Every structure is written in structure tokens, then in C-alpha cells.
Amino acid sequence: MTEKTEKMVGKMGPDPDFPGKTSANTGAKKEKSGSVPVFSDPLQTLKQVFGFETFLPGQEKVISAVLDGRSALAIFPTGQGKSLCYQLPALHLPGLTLVVSPLMALMKDQVDFLVSKGVSAARLDSSLSLDEINAIYEQLHQNTLKLLYVAPERFANERFVGLVSRLQLSVMVIDEAHCISEWGHNFRPDYLKLAELTATFDVPAVLALTATATPKVAADIRQSFSIAEQDAVQTGFYRPNLRLLFAPAKDPDQALLQHIDANQPGPTIVYVTLQKTAQQVADLLAQAGHQARAYHAGLKNELRREVQDWFMASDTAIVVATIAFGMGIDKSNIRYVYHYNLPKSLENYAQEIGRAGRDGNPSTCLVLGSAADLLILENFVYGDTPENFGVRAFVDFIMERDEYFDCAVYELGNRFDMRPLVVKTLLTYLELEGVIKSTGPFYAAYKFKPLKPSAEMLARFDADRQAFLRSLFSCAVKKKVWFTIDLDEAVEKTGSPRKRIITALDYMEQSGDLVLEVTGARLGFRRVALDTFDPEIVKENKEKLKEKLVARFGHREQSDLSRLQLVLDLVNHEGCKTRFLLNYFGEDLESDCGHCSFCLNGKNEVVCRRASGPDMMDDALVVDLRQLCMDHPKALATSRQQARFLCGLSSPRLIRAKLLRHPLYGRTEKTGFAEIMAWAEKNI
Ligand SMILES: [Zn+2]
């Protein structure tokens, strides 16, 4: 082992980012739980509570800013101890540390870890029962909780926002803070609102955390949370033990098999773009005698957990996964990370290869490039851009609602043929424009599964209550085993208030009469702007608003496409690949890395070239598609919709029209979206 790698091992040993998982095998000193001392010296706390002897690079600087009540930004690669930057100060500060994180599984691990150390910590999420939620609220009122983890969606709830504004907050932590940047790789509409909201809370310090941020995204985060430049701390991304290789792949199956066969077995992740590819490639590898399994968001939770456990326990396992894999795992000896398909962005690539070789030992990361991948990724981008007329109609629709209104994302998606994320983004844009204001999400219906015959349930109630329950049950609509009760309808039919109905259903669930679940999530809003008495001004404002939103989506499309171009730039780069990548993240290596495919071969091979597939757009297609458009005027009205259909990109209306199994669906998926759209505009 070289001196350099030895140093890495020392640096990367204990992994405070996933303390629950790793503290058992890091050799870190364990403290007696339940005996948290009085905290005055951070280093003392580090040793006594967290069991580490020294801080990792960057931690001390961030911690001292937070303890001084200054907002800070920490850009540390995954596994370099971001969580400690707030967990430790939380024990020294008087008020609550509120952690906003989109990663539910990580939240649970962290809370379990903190509680095992005797720290008062909790998480608020939708899996908790009403009693558990009330217990947390009680602790908040008494100011006995040190850390509370919540998902960003929680802030759409006015009651929760009201509660937070009354609490004594010491720090607000924004995990995965890059999600705030619209020009970042993982924009989440909820995060845009979060920055505005945070400014309204009386909180001394905001701590923004991320593993990947370009200088532009970092600047966006700093501006959003008013973080001074000197309080932004970035530790290096450079991992000298990773060999970054790139190879063109006419036949990626063959290329992957060759590489796997030619190398020593070791824990391996193969990243793919599509769920169906994950299964295909896993089967391919298994047939060739490797221990390979697929992992993607389409699998049941139980199975995913099983695959994870299997991977964690093995030294030869290969997981073929979509990007969903790796969030909750920390395996230090992953030897190979293959990209069977091109990564979506350089940020994704950096995060995915960052899972290799955390133990500091040499590890290989190989990207196989093919032109078909590029088309698929580009088509995803196009598929997520809504129609201009759709955006315009959406604005009109919202402006025509009552002052207080509610809607469901899937309903709007069907009405305007937009995917759920696009609907949520549009609603967020309207909120940011001050046109609507969230009044919070709620459930419009309850569903239950009876565990006893209704006569038996009713028997123990008096005549009055029996009559009420009978009329309540008469509102229930049966679907196989579950019954659904629409709350508005039940209020009307039974003449009882909403609260009595919910209390009755809750009571019966507690008595073991039935299993109860909420359903029909709806978002409540209030319309606030554009109301003046002058209809001309309203019209003019509305027009401006529509143009602004359309332009915003156009800008996003361009920005997503240029992000893909950067991936292409890296794989084809005529020079040290490692340097190119680090440069993108604002870091400069003083010399070439010496161990990437350029440095090893002394030259570059063009890995991925933009190419058009065979031209499938012939006269027969024109005839067939015109007929289909007449049969489905709503699903195939515009050239963008037609292009989506031909490229095999799903949309709510295509699903409703049952067109995903049509032989023409995905017919021209080997041709670029923009080209097909132009063709459709001319010919259909
Ligand atoms: Zn190099």
C-alpha cells in the first residue's frame, strides 16, 4: 500500500455519515448510552458521545461557525462526516436543531443512532401513528427535544409551519441543499419554497449540506440562505485510489461481461438508466455464472431491503441498479462501479463513483458509452417539458378557482397531460410568483378493511351511535376488500361533522374492528394575487405570468440538455479525466492524475458520439399516425405529444388512452426527440 492510500484509509475509516450502520465495526470507542454529560468542549463531546478521537477535514470549521450562530455551507463528499456538523452542535445549543432531509431511510438510521447515544432525537414522517406524532409535539412544546428530522414536504402544512415559528430554534439544517438550485441536477420544488420560509423563522443559523455542488450551485445555496463566503467549507473530492476508465461500447453486454471476467471478483455496482435494463443485465450476468441481482425503485420495499442485505454481506455480489441504489448503504470495499449506461450528469457520476473504494484500496470505475444512451437521456429531458398551451391552460384553470380551492396532483396531471413532478413544479412557480399560497395537504377520504362482520361491530354501541355508524357505513364504497369513504360526502349524508366521523373510525380501528388508512391526498391553496377591479390589468398580468412560466420551462430544458452535454464532454475529453471532473466541481489538481484512461493510455478514444438511428419515419408511418391522432384527439393533439408517443415517453393521457402497448409506441426511440417533433410538425 502506498503512503497516499494509507493516508486515505486513516481519513476514511469511521464513517460518521452513516453512524448507525458503521459504528459497530469501526473500532471506535463506545460510550455508555444514556449518560450524556454536560457539554462545553466540542472535542470532549466528539470523544464522549460520538466515539471519535479527532475531527475529519472541514468539520471543525463548520461546527465553530454554527456554534457562533453563523449560517454555513458544508460541501463534503458522502461519507466524510456531514451529519456530525449539526449533531455535535445540537448538544451544545439551547434550542432545537431542525433537520430537513428528503432521505427517509437515512433519517431513521440517524435517529436510532442518536437515541442509542442517549440524545433526545425524533423524526416526523407519515409512517408514524397519531399517538407517536402527539408525543413528539408534546416534547417540542416542553423544549426537551434536541433534534427533529422532517421531510421537506412537511412545510406545505400550515399548522407545522405555525408550530415551528413558535419554537426555540438554534439551527435549521438543510440536507441535500443542492436540491434548491433550479440549475442543479436534482431540483425539488419543495426546496425552492424552503429558502423563503426559512427567512421567516427566528433561527440564528442555517446549515446547508451537500455532497456535490458546482461553484454555481454553491453560490445559489449561499445566496438563498444568506451564507457568507468564508462560511462555505468545501473539502476535496479527489480520490487517488479510484481509476476512472471510459470505453466505447458498441455492444455493452459483451463489454461489461469482458471486464467483469477479466478482473478479480469483488463487490460491484453496475448502474443502468432504466428499470427494465437492470433486470436484463442482472439476468445476463447471472446466466454467465456471476452472483448478480437487480435493484430499482419498481421493486417492493421488502425485496429491495433483501437485495441490500445480500450485497452488504457478500464479497463477490454484483448489484445492477438504477440510481436509486446506494443512498442508504455504506460498504467500504466496493471494488468496481460500472456505468452500463451513461450517467445522467457529472453530479450523478461523482456521487456514484464515490461509493467505490471507501476503504482507500484501489478500485475501478468504468463508463461504457453508447449513442443510444444519450438519446434516451435527452428524451427524458424533453418528456418533462410541458406544452406551452398546457402551461397557459393551467394558469387559466388556477385563476378560475374559488379563493380557497384544493386539487390533486394526479387530477391536474391528467387534465393537462403533465407528469406529477411537472405539476408540482408549476404549482411551486405559481406560489413563488405570489399567485397562490399553500394552505396545506389533506386527505379527502378514508379507506378501511373490516375485521369483523358489521353486526358485531355495531352491537356494543347504543341505538343513537348505531344509527350514526349505519349511515356512515352506507357511504362506503366497496372495492375488493377495502371500503372507501369520501369525507365531504359522509359529512353531508350523516349530518355529522368531519371530526366526529374521523374519531369514530379511529376508535373502531383502536378496538380492532377494522384497519384504517387515509387516501386521496389533496393540496389546499388560497388564490392571492392578480385580483384587481380592472379586467384589462388582470388580463395583462395573466399574459405576462404565462409567458414567464413558459420561458422558465424552456430555460430548464436547455439547462438539463447542457448538463448532458457535459457528460459527453467528460467521456470524450482529450486529457486527464480526473482533472476535468474535479475542475467542474471547482477543484484543481496540480498535475494529471496518472491513473485515468487518458493518463494510462496516453491518448483518448472517442467514447460516445452523437448519432441518429435508422430513419423509421416513412410514408406508412405518416398514414398510420394520422389515423391514430384522429382516434385519440386528446392524447395526440400536438406535435410534442406525438413525439413523446413515438419516442416511447409515457404521459398521463397516453396511459389513459391505453396507448403504451400500441405497436407505434416507442417506434422511433432511436431518433432524437427534437428531430421527431420537427418531423411531426411538418407531416402530421
Ligand atoms: Zn488522469
Image (cartoon, rainbow, N blue to C red):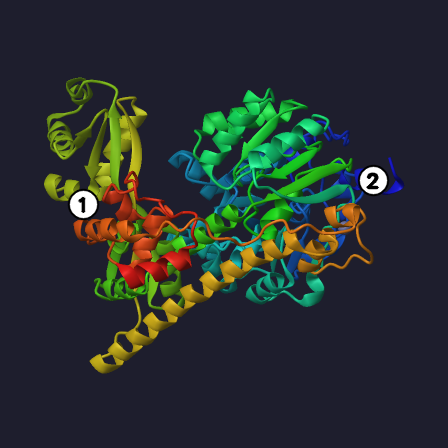
Per the image, label 1 sits on a secondary structure element best described as helix
- Please state the horizontal and vertical placement of residue 471, each as a whole percent of the image: 11, 33
Q: Amino acid at mark 2?
A: Thr
Quarter where residue 226 is shown: bottom right
Q: Is mark 1 within 8 Å of ligand 1?
A: no
Residue 615 x, y percent position in the rendering: 40, 51
Drawn side of residue 181 relative to residue 520, left or right: right
Q: Is residue 105 visible?
A: yes
Q: Amino acid at mark 1?
A: Asp
Q: Residue at x 22, y 43 (%)?
A: 498
Q: Does residue 266 show up?
A: no
Quarter containing the C terminus = bottom left
Q: Residues within 10 Å of mark 2 (few under 14, many from 20)?
A: some
Looking at the figure, which quarter contains the N terminus? Answer: top right
Instruction: Please state which of residues 51 and 579 is positioned toward the viewer in this rendering.
Output: 579
Image height of 319 relative to 456, above or below:
below
